[in-house]
Image: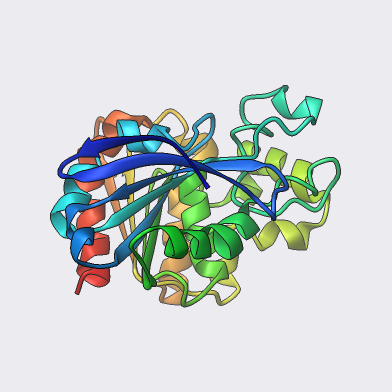
Amino acid sequence: MTTLEEHRCFDGMQGFYEHASREVGLPMRFGVYVPPQAAKGPRPVLYCLAGLTCNEQTFAIKAGAQQHAARHGLVLVTPDTSPRNTGVGEADADWDFGTAAGFYLDATREPYAGRWRMESWLMRELSPLLQAQFPVRGDRAGILGHSMGGHGALTLALRHPGRFSSVSALAPICAPTEVAWGRKAFLGYLGEDADAWARHDAVRLIEGGARAPALLVDQGLEDQFLASQLRPERLEAACAASGQPLELRRHAGYDHGYFFIASFIADHIEHHARTLCA
């Protein structure tokens, strides 16, 4: 693991790091915020997954989460959103697919199958690396995300029961099999197998019996992608029909960006801290 940069922040340390990933076969980057309480021992960890076009620094720099993590004693982890410098030329053709658009899954379709292994990197490789290198409690983990990262937070929690004790999302892609962003990603990464698509769709997973800890979801009503790409009403209906606990909060006047995230990130950190720091 290589330290790229570190900065004192709210009496803790915000760092950015790189390691040689076995799962991806390339260097992968991630950020870690270590709160001041970690000086006395390992602390619970909260994974923060960013959206399309973002990298490991975006959430760390824009969300304003460190001050709240420092108050509760949470380690924050911000993974990159895809492999980089893969040699796959078509990966850089569009902003919503390929580079910076990994969708937190393992691709099975070439030429992406060898490198786009975001789920395995997060769940099988990054987690033990963090426990080995940072003061992180492996038995106390939560996950949150925004947009594509909200899709990732929901689906990873549903696909890996017991791994995350708390889950939340801001403006997540709730039903990716039904919208353009998800269809484009799933066709490109997974091919035409509809069953494979459903295994990475939060609504389909819940309808199929998957469960997660109580979900907190915030959605801005002036979000330019609300009707076309996000579909929170589909998540709401699936949770109501299945008994999956969900608190879906709709906010007048807020759009899709980081000003929206910064406005409600304190509530999300508090949501996770109630479980992780109890």
Q: Percent x, y for residue 132?
A: 46, 64
Q: Residue visible at 80% across and 25% down?
A: 89
Q: Residue visible at 77% across and 57% down?
A: 194
Q: Percent x, y for residue 96?
A: 62, 30
207 left or right, relative to 183: left
Question: In the figure, residue 275 lies in which quadrant?
Answer: bottom left
Q: 67 or 98, which is in the foreground? A: 67
Q: Percent x, y for residue 206?
A: 53, 69
Q: Percent x, y for residue 136?
A: 35, 64
Q: Residue furthest front?
A: 2
Which quadrant is the C terminus positioned in?
Answer: bottom left
Q: 131 or 82, which is in the foreground? A: 131
Q: How many discs appear? A: 0
Asked whether residue 222 is in view, the answer is no
In the rendered image of this protein, does residue 63 appear above or below residue 134? above
Q: Residue visible at 44% across and 50% down?
A: 232
Asked whether residue 108 is in view, the answer is yes
Question: In the figure, residue 82 lies in which quadrant?
Answer: top right
Question: In the figure, residue 64 lies in which quadrant?
Answer: top left
